Image (cartoon, grey):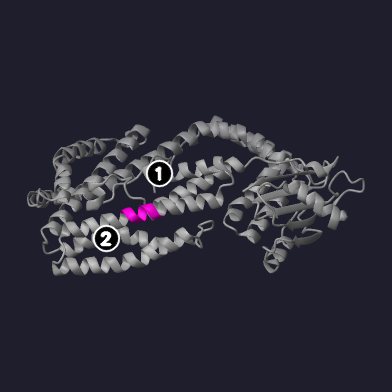
Amino acid sequence: MGTMHTNIGPKLAGTLLLLLGLAGLLLAGAPAALAVPPAAVVVEDRAGVLDRNTLLPAVENIDFYQPTRVAVYTYNGSAADNLNEEVLRFARAEHPDWISPDGQKWADGLFIFALDPVGRHVGTYMGEDRKVSLEQRADIQDAAKELLRDAQWTDGTIAGIRRGAELINQPWYRSTAFLVTAWSAAGAAVAGVGGWLLVRWRTRVGARREIARGDANYANVSMDLQVTELNAGTIPESSRYGSTVLEKHRTFLSRYNAATELSNQVHALTRRQLGRRSSLALARKYADAAAELDALDDVISDTNALLNRGSIWATAWDRQLAPFRNDLAGIEGMLGKSHGEGGSATASSLRAFRDRSQRDIERWTAELSEGSISPETALDRLRDARTELSELLKSHADTVIAGYARNEREAKLMRKGMEDAQSGAGKKQRRSYEPSILGTVYPSYYFFSVPTFNTGFTSGVGSVSTARGGSTTGYGGSGGSFSGSGSSSSF
């Protein structure tokens, strides 16, 4: 990694020193912040999801700015529940000490963290002397959500309380607003120089990395160019698979020449030019073109070896099996994820298919070795098996969506995540070329794989979580005139 050098100049240096001195004067007059443990910790785990042996020591060691009573309440509700209303109901019935003497607010010195693991709501509530803004309450809840989505109830609760301790009664000089104000001028002063240099440096590093990636693949293709032509010359055109691979080969030389031109262009770039975004895009284009050519010449070699039963046919066959084997190996991990619906009927079908397919792979390989089936028949069987897996994954996607989505709107968001992952249409979801005979013969979206399923599910859950993210601030019909500071949101 290179070192950036810059001369910021006497005027800019003087500005920075002035700003640093001003910040020092402001901080010198600020009172020291206290760091005190909770005054008390009360845990009402009615949902039975928290590990007290982990939770209590962790919360008792969290520092607040002022002595604060921490209350944790969990219960098993439903998606339609108003968590705010439920927390108030519970407090009135079981903990009137959580409510102010006039019955209208939460008690002073109190911070409540509430969780509904079934309805998937999280809420935060404070006494008037501990309250924070709605945006900060959302910040506290957001700090817990990633863990809560993964059913890590104890760790999520600790994370939320820790973030609450950072924001409740936060001294003015530690607030985001102050820090932004104090340093924005300095940031503006250096941004024009430091920021510009950083962007240029990162762009230059990225471009060089892409050029190195392209060079490695381009060298492989160039070295094997004559061998690739010989392999293509003996692929049987009468084969359905062979003829399609040959179609790809017919453009191989023109694509190689285009990659050569790109190589010449990127290697002619000066150090200064490498810092431009257009140069990074050009370097990435070169690297992608060379990588696809390198994969294609391997496929041409494998096609020739397998269809003609050459000396390395077994190695070539193993490479055709590799994507399918990876899918089968990933099924259990996929089903074991949070909300993976591992106990469903569609999950059972996937497991049964995996076990059967592992036996089938051994049988196909033995028959291919004996010559009792042709290479084309073996490829047909592999294609049919991957097609069947695709259908089973689609069925399981319906199961997972039905289990996670609360309504049709959320189901549509999740289905879109799955569809975008399969087609490569989603952001950062570009489908890469599969370096296999089937990957060359069929389009990238033809087979639905386990990694694609995982990507689609993660994307869909993210979209749903964003849609659920709005805060609820009221206390429902039973709340009456109660107006304590608090809100809840979904995760």
> Relative to 115, is 277 above or below?
above
Question: Residue at horizontal 54%, vertical 56%?
Answer: 339
Question: Residue at horizontal 66%, vertical 48%?
Answer: 141
Residue 321 disc label: 2
**Of the pair 122 and 111, the residue shown nearer to us:** 122
Q: Magenta region: which residues? A: 387-392
Label 1 Cα crowd, 10 Å radius (few <14 / some 14-19 / many 20+): some
> Relative to 374, is 202 above or below?
above
> Relative to 105, is 363 above or below?
below
Residue 175 visible here: no
Is 64 displayed left or right of 5 in the figure? right
- Mark 1 or mark 2, which has the lower sequence index? 2
Residue 429 disc label: 1
Between the C-alphas of marks 1 and 2, the distance is 24 Å
Magenta stretch containing residue 437, yes or no?
no
Magenta stretch containing residue 390, yes or no?
yes
Question: Residue at horizontal 53%, vertical 42%?
Answer: 463
Main secondary structure found in the magenta portion: helix
Q: Position of residue 66 (x, y in %)?
A: 80, 52
Label 2 Cα crowd, 10 Å radius (few <14 / some 14-19 / many 20+): some
- Secondary structure beneath label 1: loop
> Relative to 372, is 172 above or below?
above
Q: Amino acid at mark 1?
A: Gln
Q: Quadrant of residue 325?
A: bottom left
Q: Quadrant of residue 115?
A: bottom right
Instruction: Give the residue at the far right of this rendering.
Output: 102
Q: Position of residue 372 (x, y in %)?
A: 15, 67
**Of the pair 180 and 356, the residue shown nearer to us:** 356
Question: Residue at horizontal 18%, vertical 48%?
Answer: 221
Please name which of the two marks, 1 or 2, marks the residue nearer to the observer. 2
Q: Amino acid at mark 2?
A: Leu
